[in-house]
Amino acid sequence: MIAPPAPSNPDAVIPRLDVDWVERWRSLVQARESQAARLRAQTGLDPPVYWDRRAEGFRANVQQRVGEADRLLQLVSERAGADSAVLDVGAGVGRHALPLARMRREVVAVEPSATMRGYLKADAAAEGITNLTVVPCAWEGAGVPVCEIALCSHVVYSIVDIAGFVDKLRRHAAQYCFMAIRTGLRDAQLLELWKLVHGEDKVPEPGFLELYNVLHQRFRIAANVEITGFRRPSNPLGMFSSPQEAAAAVREQLYVAEGALKGAGVEEYLSTHLVRDEEGRLFLPGPRVGAAIVWWENRADSWNLLA
Ligand SMILES: C[S@@+](CC[C@H](N)C(=O)[O-])C[C@H]1O[C@@H](n2cnc3c(N)ncnc32)[C@H](O)[C@@H]1O
Protein backbone atom coordinates (compact mmCIF):
# COMPACT_ATOMS: atom_id res chain seq x y z
CA MET A 1 0.00 0.00 0.00
CA ILE A 2 1.29 3.42 -0.87
CA ALA A 3 1.39 5.80 2.11
CA PRO A 4 -0.45 9.11 1.60
CA PRO A 5 1.96 12.03 1.16
CA ALA A 6 2.80 13.92 4.31
CA PRO A 7 1.13 17.33 4.47
CA SER A 8 3.45 19.82 2.86
CA ASN A 9 5.14 22.35 5.07
CA PRO A 10 6.75 25.07 2.97
CA ASP A 11 8.34 26.60 6.06
CA ALA A 12 10.44 23.45 6.49
CA VAL A 13 11.90 23.92 3.01
CA ILE A 14 12.27 27.68 2.91
CA PRO A 15 12.38 29.27 6.37
CA ARG A 16 9.96 32.15 6.77
CA LEU A 17 11.30 35.63 7.29
CA ASP A 18 9.26 36.86 10.19
CA VAL A 19 9.69 40.61 9.85
CA ASP A 20 6.90 42.67 11.36
CA TRP A 21 7.17 45.65 9.01
CA VAL A 22 4.99 47.95 11.07
CA GLU A 23 7.20 47.33 14.09
CA ARG A 24 10.35 47.68 12.04
CA TRP A 25 9.10 51.06 10.82
CA ARG A 26 8.27 52.14 14.38
CA SER A 27 11.72 51.08 15.64
CA LEU A 28 13.52 53.01 12.88
CA VAL A 29 11.57 56.21 13.50
CA GLN A 30 11.91 56.01 17.27
CA ALA A 31 15.62 55.16 17.21
CA ARG A 32 16.27 58.01 14.78
CA GLU A 33 14.27 60.44 16.93
CA SER A 34 16.03 59.47 20.15
CA GLN A 35 19.44 59.70 18.49
CA ALA A 36 18.60 63.19 17.21
CA ALA A 37 17.26 64.31 20.61
CA ARG A 38 20.37 63.02 22.41
CA LEU A 39 22.81 64.69 20.01
CA ARG A 40 20.89 67.96 19.98
CA ALA A 41 20.90 68.01 23.78
CA GLN A 42 24.69 67.43 23.80
CA THR A 43 25.30 70.42 21.59
CA GLY A 44 22.66 72.57 23.32
CA LEU A 45 20.65 73.05 20.13
CA ASP A 46 16.91 73.56 20.47
CA PRO A 47 14.79 71.08 18.56
CA PRO A 48 14.04 72.98 15.37
CA VAL A 49 10.48 73.62 14.25
CA TYR A 50 11.56 71.55 11.32
CA TRP A 51 9.02 72.20 8.59
CA ASP A 52 8.46 75.85 9.51
CA ARG A 53 12.18 76.47 8.98
CA ARG A 54 12.20 74.73 5.66
CA ALA A 55 9.07 76.33 4.23
CA GLU A 56 10.78 79.26 2.45
CA GLY A 57 13.30 77.01 0.67
CA PHE A 58 10.51 74.61 -0.25
CA ARG A 59 8.44 77.33 -1.80
CA ALA A 60 11.38 78.65 -3.83
CA ASN A 61 12.04 75.13 -5.08
CA VAL A 62 8.39 74.50 -5.99
CA GLN A 63 8.14 77.86 -7.78
CA GLN A 64 11.30 77.18 -9.80
CA ARG A 65 9.76 73.95 -11.00
CA VAL A 66 6.34 75.27 -12.10
CA GLY A 67 5.68 73.91 -15.58
CA GLU A 68 8.11 70.99 -15.24
CA ALA A 69 6.60 67.53 -15.71
CA ASP A 70 5.63 66.01 -12.37
CA ARG A 71 4.95 62.29 -12.67
CA LEU A 72 2.85 62.07 -9.51
CA LEU A 73 0.63 64.89 -10.71
CA GLN A 74 0.35 63.22 -14.08
CA LEU A 75 -0.70 59.87 -12.58
CA VAL A 76 -3.25 61.52 -10.30
CA SER A 77 -4.70 63.63 -13.13
CA GLU A 78 -5.10 60.56 -15.33
CA ARG A 79 -7.26 58.94 -12.67
CA ALA A 80 -9.13 61.89 -11.18
CA GLY A 81 -12.22 62.92 -13.13
CA ALA A 82 -12.89 66.66 -13.51
CA ASP A 83 -15.52 66.34 -10.79
CA SER A 84 -13.20 64.68 -8.28
CA ALA A 85 -12.25 65.89 -4.85
CA VAL A 86 -8.59 65.27 -3.99
CA LEU A 87 -7.16 65.04 -0.49
CA ASP A 88 -3.50 66.10 -0.16
CA VAL A 89 -2.06 65.00 3.19
CA GLY A 90 1.03 67.00 4.18
CA ALA A 91 0.47 69.39 1.28
CA GLY A 92 3.42 71.65 2.13
CA VAL A 93 3.38 74.83 0.07
CA GLY A 94 1.06 73.23 -2.49
CA ARG A 95 3.30 71.55 -5.04
CA HIS A 96 0.39 69.24 -5.90
CA ALA A 97 -2.56 70.94 -4.16
CA LEU A 98 -2.36 74.14 -6.26
CA PRO A 99 -2.19 72.54 -9.73
CA LEU A 100 -4.87 70.02 -8.73
CA ALA A 101 -7.15 72.81 -7.51
CA ARG A 102 -6.81 74.43 -10.95
CA MET A 103 -7.88 71.20 -12.67
CA ARG A 104 -10.32 69.44 -10.39
CA ARG A 105 -13.53 70.23 -8.47
CA GLU A 106 -12.07 70.47 -4.99
CA VAL A 107 -8.84 69.97 -3.05
CA VAL A 108 -8.59 69.43 0.69
CA ALA A 109 -5.03 70.12 1.89
CA VAL A 110 -4.01 68.94 5.37
CA GLU A 111 -0.91 70.75 6.61
CA PRO A 112 0.34 71.15 10.21
CA SER A 113 3.10 73.72 9.57
CA ALA A 114 1.82 77.29 9.91
CA THR A 115 4.56 78.66 7.64
CA MET A 116 3.86 76.10 4.90
CA ARG A 117 0.13 76.89 5.16
CA GLY A 118 0.85 80.61 4.98
CA TYR A 119 2.59 80.24 1.61
CA LEU A 120 -0.04 77.81 0.33
CA LYS A 121 -2.93 80.12 1.19
CA ALA A 122 -1.17 83.24 -0.10
CA ASP A 123 -0.36 81.60 -3.43
CA ALA A 124 -3.91 80.23 -3.77
CA ALA A 125 -5.37 83.67 -3.02
CA ALA A 126 -3.01 85.40 -5.48
CA GLU A 127 -4.36 83.10 -8.20
CA GLY A 128 -7.98 83.48 -7.16
CA ILE A 129 -8.27 79.77 -6.29
CA THR A 130 -11.45 79.23 -4.24
CA ASN A 131 -11.90 75.43 -4.30
CA LEU A 132 -9.02 74.68 -1.90
CA THR A 133 -9.70 73.98 1.78
CA VAL A 134 -6.65 74.09 4.03
CA VAL A 135 -6.94 72.01 7.22
CA PRO A 136 -4.49 73.26 9.89
CA CYS A 137 -3.39 70.11 11.67
CA ALA A 138 -1.53 66.83 11.43
CA TRP A 139 -3.22 64.01 9.56
CA GLU A 140 -3.61 61.93 12.69
CA GLY A 141 -6.04 64.50 14.16
CA ALA A 142 -7.64 65.85 10.97
CA GLY A 143 -11.40 65.60 10.40
CA VAL A 144 -11.94 65.70 6.63
CA PRO A 145 -14.49 64.28 4.18
CA VAL A 146 -13.81 61.16 2.12
CA CYS A 147 -12.49 62.22 -1.31
CA GLU A 148 -12.17 60.30 -4.57
CA ILE A 149 -8.37 60.43 -4.39
CA ALA A 150 -5.95 60.71 -1.46
CA LEU A 151 -2.31 61.58 -1.97
CA CYS A 152 0.57 61.88 0.44
CA SER A 153 3.92 62.92 -0.98
CA HIS A 154 7.15 62.69 1.06
CA VAL A 155 5.47 62.98 4.45
CA VAL A 156 5.72 59.70 6.35
CA TYR A 157 9.47 59.45 7.14
CA SER A 158 9.02 60.45 10.78
CA ILE A 159 5.56 59.05 11.44
CA VAL A 160 5.78 56.56 14.32
CA ASP A 161 2.43 54.82 13.76
CA ILE A 162 2.62 54.15 10.03
CA ALA A 163 -0.23 51.62 10.16
CA GLY A 164 -2.63 54.13 11.74
CA PHE A 165 -1.54 56.82 9.27
CA VAL A 166 -2.02 54.64 6.17
CA ASP A 167 -5.25 53.15 7.48
CA LYS A 168 -6.75 56.61 7.84
CA LEU A 169 -5.48 57.57 4.39
CA ARG A 170 -7.09 54.59 2.68
CA ARG A 171 -10.36 55.14 4.55
CA HIS A 172 -10.52 58.64 3.10
CA ALA A 173 -10.04 57.62 -0.54
CA ALA A 174 -13.08 56.26 -2.37
CA GLN A 175 -11.08 55.44 -5.52
CA TYR A 176 -7.27 55.72 -5.39
CA CYS A 177 -4.43 56.33 -2.94
CA PHE A 178 -1.04 57.71 -4.00
CA MET A 179 2.05 57.94 -1.83
CA ALA A 180 5.54 59.17 -2.78
CA ILE A 181 8.58 58.14 -0.78
CA ARG A 182 12.35 58.05 -1.28
CA THR A 183 14.03 54.85 -2.42
CA GLY A 184 17.21 55.64 -0.47
CA LEU A 185 18.48 57.89 2.27
CA ARG A 186 18.06 61.64 1.89
CA ASP A 187 21.35 62.28 3.65
CA ALA A 188 23.50 59.35 2.45
CA GLN A 189 26.24 61.79 1.40
CA LEU A 190 26.55 62.92 5.04
CA LEU A 191 26.94 59.52 6.67
CA GLU A 192 30.73 59.45 6.57
CA LEU A 193 31.00 62.92 8.07
CA TRP A 194 28.28 62.05 10.59
CA LYS A 195 30.35 59.16 11.88
CA LEU A 196 33.52 61.27 12.01
CA VAL A 197 31.75 63.96 14.03
CA HIS A 198 29.64 61.80 16.35
CA GLY A 199 31.59 58.55 16.46
CA GLU A 200 28.45 56.52 15.72
CA ASP A 201 26.38 55.55 12.70
CA LYS A 202 23.31 57.56 11.86
CA VAL A 203 20.07 55.62 12.27
CA PRO A 204 18.47 55.36 8.81
CA GLU A 205 14.99 56.60 8.05
CA PRO A 206 12.31 54.23 6.74
CA GLY A 207 11.67 54.45 3.01
CA PHE A 208 10.10 52.77 0.02
CA LEU A 209 11.02 49.21 0.94
CA GLU A 210 9.49 49.46 4.40
CA LEU A 211 6.37 51.23 3.14
CA TYR A 212 5.74 48.67 0.41
CA ASN A 213 6.00 45.85 2.91
CA VAL A 214 3.75 47.59 5.43
CA LEU A 215 1.10 47.94 2.73
CA HIS A 216 1.46 44.34 1.70
CA GLN A 217 1.73 42.71 5.10
CA ARG A 218 -0.65 44.83 7.16
CA PHE A 219 -3.20 45.89 4.57
CA ARG A 220 -2.97 43.15 1.92
CA ILE A 221 -2.30 45.78 -0.72
CA ALA A 222 -0.18 44.86 -3.75
CA ALA A 223 0.52 48.44 -4.83
CA ASN A 224 1.68 49.68 -8.23
CA VAL A 225 5.12 51.30 -8.16
CA GLU A 226 6.92 53.70 -10.42
CA ILE A 227 10.43 54.84 -9.58
CA THR A 228 11.24 58.37 -10.66
CA GLY A 229 14.31 60.57 -10.24
CA PHE A 230 14.83 63.77 -8.32
CA ARG A 231 15.92 66.77 -10.31
CA ARG A 232 19.57 67.71 -9.70
CA PRO A 233 21.01 67.72 -7.14
CA SER A 234 20.32 64.02 -6.74
CA ASN A 235 20.70 64.57 -3.00
CA PRO A 236 17.91 66.78 -1.72
CA LEU A 237 20.29 68.39 0.78
CA GLY A 238 20.99 71.10 -1.71
CA MET A 239 23.34 73.24 -3.69
CA PHE A 240 25.29 76.04 -2.06
CA SER A 241 26.71 79.30 -3.30
CA SER A 242 29.63 79.41 -0.84
CA PRO A 243 31.57 77.11 1.51
CA GLN A 244 30.13 79.09 4.43
CA GLU A 245 26.57 78.43 3.30
CA ALA A 246 27.36 74.73 2.85
CA ALA A 247 28.96 74.54 6.31
CA ALA A 248 25.93 76.14 7.97
CA ALA A 249 23.51 73.74 6.25
CA VAL A 250 25.61 70.69 7.00
CA ARG A 251 26.13 71.71 10.63
CA GLU A 252 22.36 71.95 11.00
CA GLN A 253 21.88 68.47 9.51
CA LEU A 254 24.51 67.10 11.89
CA TYR A 255 23.16 68.94 14.95
CA VAL A 256 26.45 70.78 15.41
CA ALA A 257 26.20 74.32 16.81
CA GLU A 258 28.22 77.06 15.13
CA GLY A 259 31.55 77.47 16.90
CA ALA A 260 31.06 74.24 18.85
CA LEU A 261 34.15 72.15 19.30
CA LYS A 262 32.86 69.47 16.94
CA GLY A 263 32.13 72.10 14.29
CA ALA A 264 35.78 72.45 13.35
CA GLY A 265 35.80 69.02 11.71
CA VAL A 266 32.90 69.96 9.46
CA GLU A 267 34.72 72.81 7.67
CA GLU A 268 37.83 70.69 7.24
CA TYR A 269 35.85 67.81 5.75
CA LEU A 270 33.88 70.09 3.44
CA SER A 271 37.04 71.80 2.17
CA THR A 272 38.15 68.48 0.67
CA HIS A 273 34.76 66.99 -0.28
CA LEU A 274 32.63 69.78 -1.78
CA VAL A 275 32.42 69.68 -5.56
CA ARG A 276 31.38 72.44 -8.01
CA ASP A 277 28.79 71.82 -10.71
CA GLU A 278 29.01 73.40 -14.17
CA GLU A 279 27.24 76.51 -12.88
CA GLY A 280 29.79 76.95 -10.08
CA ARG A 281 27.47 75.85 -7.27
CA LEU A 282 28.81 73.65 -4.50
CA PHE A 283 27.39 70.29 -3.47
CA LEU A 284 28.42 67.15 -1.61
CA PRO A 285 28.38 64.23 -4.03
CA GLY A 286 26.60 61.10 -2.89
CA PRO A 287 24.57 58.13 -4.08
CA ARG A 288 21.59 58.83 -6.30
CA VAL A 289 18.26 58.75 -4.50
CA GLY A 290 15.03 58.12 -6.37
CA ALA A 291 11.42 58.60 -5.42
CA ALA A 292 8.90 55.80 -5.58
CA ILE A 293 5.31 56.59 -6.45
CA VAL A 294 3.31 53.88 -4.73
CA TRP A 295 -0.37 53.77 -5.65
CA TRP A 296 -3.35 51.50 -5.58
CA GLU A 297 -6.99 51.36 -6.58
CA ASN A 298 -8.92 51.38 -3.36
CA ARG A 299 -12.12 49.68 -4.48
CA ALA A 300 -13.28 46.28 -3.23
CA ASP A 301 -12.85 44.57 -6.62
CA SER A 302 -9.39 46.07 -7.31
CA TRP A 303 -6.54 43.80 -8.35
CA ASN A 304 -4.38 45.81 -5.96
CA LEU A 305 -6.26 44.38 -2.98
CA LEU A 306 -5.25 40.84 -2.15
CA ALA A 307 -7.96 38.42 -1.11
C1 LIG B 1 8.66 67.17 2.45
S1 LIG B 1 7.24 68.11 2.75
C2 LIG B 1 6.27 67.57 1.36
C3 LIG B 1 5.27 68.58 0.92
C4 LIG B 1 4.45 68.16 -0.31
N1 LIG B 1 3.64 67.00 -0.06
C5 LIG B 1 5.39 67.94 -1.49
O1 LIG B 1 5.51 66.80 -1.96
O2 LIG B 1 5.99 68.93 -1.94
C6 LIG B 1 6.47 67.28 4.12
C7 LIG B 1 5.23 67.99 4.65
O3 LIG B 1 4.50 67.10 5.50
C8 LIG B 1 4.00 67.83 6.60
N2 LIG B 1 3.76 66.88 7.70
C9 LIG B 1 4.66 66.40 8.57
N3 LIG B 1 4.05 65.57 9.44
C10 LIG B 1 2.74 65.52 9.09
C11 LIG B 1 1.59 64.84 9.61
N4 LIG B 1 1.67 64.05 10.68
N5 LIG B 1 0.40 65.04 8.99
C12 LIG B 1 0.32 65.84 7.91
N6 LIG B 1 1.36 66.50 7.38
C13 LIG B 1 2.55 66.35 7.96
C14 LIG B 1 5.09 68.85 6.88
O4 LIG B 1 4.59 69.95 7.62
C15 LIG B 1 5.54 69.23 5.48
O5 LIG B 1 4.82 70.31 4.97
Image (tube, rainbow, N blue to C red):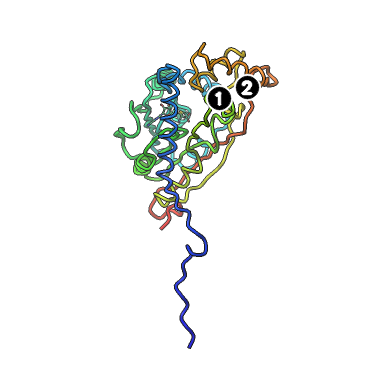
Residue sitting at x 52%, y 11%? 259
In-front residue for pair 255/207? 255
* Residue contact at pointers 2 and 1, CB within 8 angstroms: yes
Q: Which mark is residue 237?
A: 1
Classify mark 2: residues with Cα within 10 Å, few (<14), some (14-19) or many (20+).
many
For the residue marked with disc 2, what is the amino acid?
Answer: Phe
Q: Position of residue 140 (x, y in %)?
A: 33, 34
In-front residue for pair 83/214? 214
Residue sitting at x 52%, y 45%? 225
Left or right of 284 in this view: 135: left
Q: Is residue 107 above or below residue 45?
A: below
Q: Which mark is residue 300?
A: none
Q: Inspect this view and state whether residue 208 appears.
A: yes
Q: Inspect this view and state whether residue 128 appears.
A: no
Q: Position of residue 219 (x, y in %)?
A: 39, 49
Q: Earlier in the sequence, mark 2 or mark 1?
A: 1
Q: Position of residue 115 (x, y in %)?
A: 40, 19
Q: Tag 2, which secondary structure?
A: strand
